[in-house]
Image: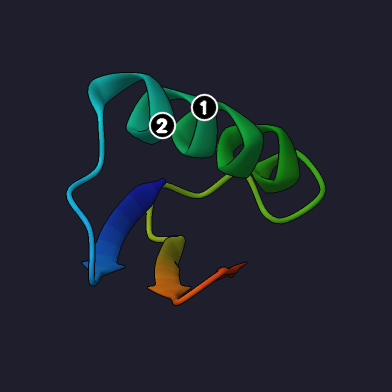
Amino acid sequence: MNISFVFKNFEASDHLKKYARRRMEKLGRFFCKSSGLDAGVVLTVDKFRHR
C-alpha cells in the first residue's frame, strides 16, 4: 500500500505521520490485498479548523 501525505499550512510531526499511516493501513485491510493500492492523505489547518 502506497500512502502519500500532503500537509498544508503546518509542519507535521513524525508522530502525526505515524498515526495517519497506521489508520490508513487498517483501512487497507478492507480492500484488495494487492500492493498496487494507493492512498492520499491531505491534512490542512485554516485558522482554528483542522481537517
**10 Å neighbourhood of mark 1: few (<14), some, or many (≥20)?**
few
Number of the label disc, if any, that sits on residue 19: 1
Number of the label disc, if any, that sits on residue 16: 2
Q: Position of residue 31 (x, y in %)?
A: 73, 55
Count of numbered tags: 2
Residue plotted at (58% across, 35% down): 25
Residue plotted at (23% across, 71% down): 9
Instruction: Judge whether 32 appears above or below 13 on screen.
Output: below
Q: Position of residue 24 (x, y in %)?
A: 59, 44
The colour scheme is: rainbow
Residue plotted at (38% across, 60% down): 36
Callout 1 amino acid? Tyr
Q: Nearer the viewer, residue 47 or 18?
A: 47
* Residues tagged 2 and 1 counted as in contact (Cβ below 8 A): yes
Residue plotted at (71% across, 33% down): 26
Q: Is residue 13 left or right of residue 49?
A: left
Q: Secondary structure at mark 2?
A: helix
The quadrant the C terminus occupies is bottom right
Callout 2 amino acid? Leu
Instruction: Judge whether 34 appears above or below 50 on screen.
Output: above
Q: Position of residue 47 (x, y in %)?
A: 46, 76
Q: Quadrant of residue 16?
A: top left
